[in-house]
Image: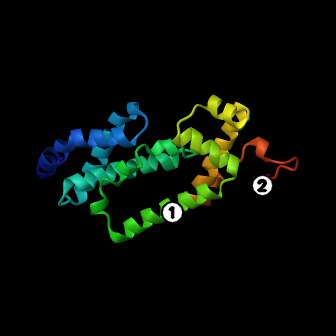
Amino acid sequence: MSEPLDVWFKSEVVVHEDALTRYLSRCWPNPEDIHDLRQETYIRAYESARKHIPTSARPFIFSIARNLMADRIRKQRIVAIDSVGDLEALNVLVDDLSPEQRTLAHQELRQLAEAFDELPETRRQVVWMRRVDEISQREVAARLGLSEKTVEKHIMKAMRQLTDAVFGKAIAIVTKPAPEERNEHGKQQAD
């Protein structure tokens, strides 16, 4: 371990531990993961700084934390809307984003909004009620006159469609359609 790197890490990175922990807690839905996310952020920051110590540590570590959370979300088979926590909190580094990154973020948000608008009406209602209004699955089923299993299927299909729209078809290849989505010839049925 190099002395200048250790000094930099202690004086420039570790001092932001409370702010980093609050940021992760706001953005990540599972509180049990916060310690691991913080530690992994530190590991990535230290490893990266071995090659080049950044001039500004705070945006550097918050960027690493944001990318780490995005990586974990991408690794999930289906991305739930609530898995990104407070969407505004993810933009904590907006001032540090390049114009290209800002444009890309706006494009992804626009893609998500357009994909949501393209969902079939019932599926859109189910997603809105479950994820935005935070109504229980049982209550959504009762309000819409559906079974709870049907509500669950609508959520799964909607998340798949929204994921495809924002992250592309590469994730769709990994998440094979459920057996009930295939016809008798083994081909995927259209929605």
| Residue where numbered disc 2 is placed | 190
The residue sitting at 22% across, 38% down in the picture is: 18
Question: Which residue is depicted at the point 39% across and 32% down?
Answer: 31
Q: Is residue 146 left or right of residue 133?
A: right
**Depth check, front residue: 43 or 110:** 110
Give, as a three-letter code, the residue at label 1: Arg
3D distance between C-alphas at marks 1 and 2: 24 Å
Q: Mark 1 near mark 2, Cβ–Cβ under 8 Å?
A: no
Give whichever of 7, 78 is nearer the camera: 78
The residue under the point 67% across, 34% down is 143
**Residue 105 appears in view:** yes
Q: Residue extending furthest right? A: 184
Residue 20: horizontal and vertical position, in percent? 27, 43
Residue at 57% x, 38% y: name it.
130
Q: From the top left corner, tell me how far across and down residue 168 is, in percent.
A: 58, 60
Identity, as a three-letter code, of the amino acid under mark 2: Ala
The residue beneath circle 1 is 110
Q: Is residue 142 left or right of residue 11?
A: right
Q: Residues within 10 Å of mark 1 (few under 14, many from 20)?
A: few
Q: Based on the displayed image, in which of its 4 quarters is residue 154 positioned?
A: top right
Mark 1 or mark 2: which comes first in sequence? 1
